[in-house]
């Protein structure tokens, strides 16, 4: 007997969508795939209310919990813990070696913007992580108010888990000033599980050193704002047959450089970036 799902995900998927999964595969380096990917991410930008970058990941949403804290936390992150899922995200941050703090809220209660503001006023955090809709307790947070409180503190990024709220209630990423908003396909989108989605603000992406709008077309100078041990990175890449350059002169420890001049193909650069992601332990977009 077929049982209709009334659980907090995965959700029911329409027959025509399930049927689409049976169509022949296409190559991921073909014009057809580029057109499809562009169409999908364009629609996701519209639903998320963002003009920024949207990425698809072949992982669970939990994978993006890890991606958020590994890529966007400089020194210390404040987790708003109010239920089982926000508790788990805090644990993911801790296990990834991040310096973590907690704003504990009684289960069944919402996170208050004034409490977030109070914690940030101490100047100990550069990131805040909050679950928009905590399905373990059935509580939704006033994300607009929390985001406003975070924006009042310079250089603090807002990481939002919107797995069970995205497409079920508005989450306007740009209007609210969310820096990283993650979700999955198997909840309110009513799609099969297997893909995770992230909207990433401009200020949250791996920074370039050059003045915006004046970046060199033949070489990229990456700002080392994550404290990467560049000599170790170069050595590890060398073992894979790849060579990049460290910073030059007084920028030696503050940057590293990737040349893309001469006879260099796009697929080769993707390979270099994937190798860097793998060595640094970060997911490739």
Image (cartoon, rainbow, N blue to C red):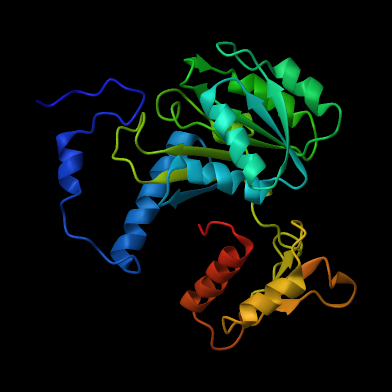
State whether residue 81 appears in this view.
yes
Q: Which residue is drawn at 36% across and 48% down?
A: 40
Question: Which residue is more in the foreground, 215 or 120?
Answer: 120
Residue 184 place in picture, x, y as percent: 41, 38
Question: From this viewpoint, is residue 51 visible?
Answer: no
Q: Which residue is drawn at 60% across and 45% down?
A: 68
205 is higher (above) or lower (below) than 261: above
Specify whether 224 is left or right of 16: right
Q: Which residue lies furthest to the right in this view?
A: 250
| Residue 144 location, quadrant | top right
Q: In which quarter of the image is residue 109?
A: top right
Q: In which quarter of the image is the N terminus?
A: top left
In the picture shown, does residue 205 fall above or below 100?
below
- Outermost residue on the left side: it is 1
Q: How many marks can you see?
A: 0
x, y percentage for residue 13?
Answer: 23, 33
Image quarter of residue 264: bottom right
Residue at image position (76%, 63%) is: 209
Q: Position of residue 233 (x, y in %)?
A: 69, 72
């Amino acid at each position: 007997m077929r049982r209709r799902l009334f659980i907090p995900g995965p959700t029911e998927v329409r027959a025509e969508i399930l049927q689409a999964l049976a169509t022949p595969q296409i190559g991921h380096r073909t014009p057809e795939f580029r057109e499809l990917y562009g169409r999908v991410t364009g629609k996701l930008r519209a639903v998320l209310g963002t003009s920024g970058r949207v990425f698809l990941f072949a992982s669970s949403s939990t994978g993006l919990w890890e991606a958020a804290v590994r890529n966007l936390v400089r020194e210390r992150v404040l987790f708003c813990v109010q239920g089982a899922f926000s508790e788990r995200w805090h644990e993911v941050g801790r296990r990834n070696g991040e310096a973590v703090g907690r704003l504990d809220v009684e289960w069944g209660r919402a996170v208050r913007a004034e409490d977030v503001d109070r914690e940030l006023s101490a100047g100990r955090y550069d990131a805040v992580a909050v679950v928009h809709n905590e399905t373990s307790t059935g509580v939704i947070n006033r994300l607009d108010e929390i985001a406003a409180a975070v924006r009042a503190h310079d250089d603090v990024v807002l990481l939002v888990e919107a797995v069970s709220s995205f497409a079920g209630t508005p989450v306007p990423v740009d209007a609210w000033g969310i820096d990283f908003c993650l979700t999955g396909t198997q909840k309110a989108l009513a799609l099969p599980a297997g893909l995770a989605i992230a909207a990433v603000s401009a200020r949250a992406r791996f920074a370039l050193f050059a003045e915006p709008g004046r970046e060199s077309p033949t070489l990229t100078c990456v700002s080392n704002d994550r404290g990467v041990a560049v000599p170790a990175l170069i050595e590890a890449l060398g073992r894979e047959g790849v060579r990049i350059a460290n910073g030059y002169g007084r920028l030696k420890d503050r940057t590293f450089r990737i040349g893309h001049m001469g006879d260099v193909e796009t697929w080769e650069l993707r390979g270099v970036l994937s190798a860097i992601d793998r060595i640094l332990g970060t997911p490739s977009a």
